[in-house]
Image: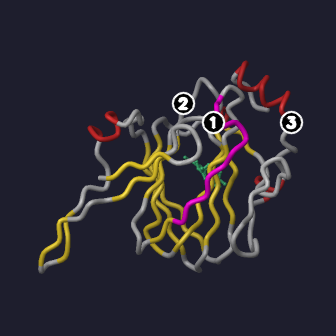
């Protein structure tokens, strides 16, 4: 597998290296040894699937707070998405920067996010399925989030936004001081 660090500290694009023959190909899609060698967390507590009816759907931005170190390994298994990771870790060298990567069923690229990044994606096609592994069990009390259109992040979504959950429309504005306090205390911002 190929591991390419991207513009936010700790985020990696992960590509398969297929062995092709007349039948098709074989490739690893997850490798604990490679993850460990590249400083990525290999633990998997859950593997989640989300299905989205409509192109333009946005899920996120979601993150877990310190005390609940949830890394994510994301792949699009049907259709296409743009995946976004925003660095809200106050002491990070890439604080407030974000990366945006197209993950499609066709390109089979995957994205690794270390814990405590704000994560979201937008579907680019109808009937899109996303498969992602997380390193710790779901803990709703440790989750917080931000709106996809929060001006603090300046995310440019590639297609018109068609659907967002009520939960994701309700996150408060990003407040750097509240965020720093949340990271210091491990409590929701
Ligand atoms: C994420 C999750 C949700 N749920 C429940 C809570 C709720 O009733 C229902 C739907 O939850 P949500 O609306 O939060 O689902 P969703 O908006 O798809 O949440 C996901 O968004 C993307 C962007 C991420 O980064 C993921 O980590 C996760 O937060 O599923 C679980 O039981 N276990 C889980 O692991």
Badge 1 is on which residue? 64
Q: Which residue is found at the position 55% from the left and 40% from the top?
A: 138
Find residue 83 and report its horizontal and vertical position in percent. Answer: 58, 59
Q: Is mark 1 within 8 Å of ligand 1?
A: yes
**Which of 57/90 is in front?**
90
129 lies above or below 61: below
72 lies above or below 175: below
Find residue 67 and report its horizontal and vertical position in percent. Answer: 59, 23
Q: Secondary structure at mark 1?
A: strand
Residue stretch rendered in magenta on the structure: 92-102
Q: Which dot, 3 or 1, sits closer to the camera? A: 3
Q: Which residue is found at the position 62% from the left and 26% from the top?
A: 66
| Mark 1 vs mark 2, CA separation in Å | 7 Å
Q: Splitting the image into 4 quarters, where does residue 56 fall? A: bottom right
Q: Is residue 93 magenta?
A: yes
Q: Secondary structure at mark 3?
A: loop
Mark nearer the N terminus (1 vs 2): 1
Q: Is residue 95 magenta?
A: yes
63 lies above or below 13: above
Residue 113: mark in rendering: none
The quarter of the picture where the C terminus appears is: top right
Q: Which residue is found at the position 62% from the left and 60% from the top?
A: 121
The answer to whether mark 1 and mark 2 are in CB contact below 8 A is: yes
Badge 2 is on which residue? 69
Badge 3 is on which residue? 175
Find residue 141 and report its horizontal and vertical position in percent. Answer: 67, 33
């Amino acid at each position: 597998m190929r591991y390419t660090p991207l513009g936010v500290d700790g985020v990696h694009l992960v590509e398969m290296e297929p062995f092709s023959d007349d039948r098709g190909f074989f490739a690893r899609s997850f490798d604990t040894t490679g993850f460990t060698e590249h400083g990525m967390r290999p633990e998997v507590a859950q593997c989640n699937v989300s299905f989205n009816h409509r192109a333009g759907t946005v899920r996120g931005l979601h993150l877990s707070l310190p005390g609940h170190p949830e890394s994510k390994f994301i792949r699009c298994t049907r259709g296409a998405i743009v995946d976004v990771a925003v660095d809200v870790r106050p002491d990070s060298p890439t604080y407030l920067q974000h990366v945006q990567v197209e993950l499609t069923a066709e390109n089979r690229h995957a994205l690794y996010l270390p814990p405590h990044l704000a994560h979201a994606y937008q579907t680019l096609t109808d009937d899109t399925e996303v498969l992602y592994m997380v390193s710790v069990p779901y803990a709703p009390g440790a989750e917080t989030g931000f709106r996809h259109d929060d001006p603090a992040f300046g995310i440019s979504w590639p297609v018109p936004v068609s659907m967002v959950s009520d939960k994701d429309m309700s996150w408060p504005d990003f407040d750097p001081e509240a965020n720093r306090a949340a990271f210091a205390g491990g409590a929701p911002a």
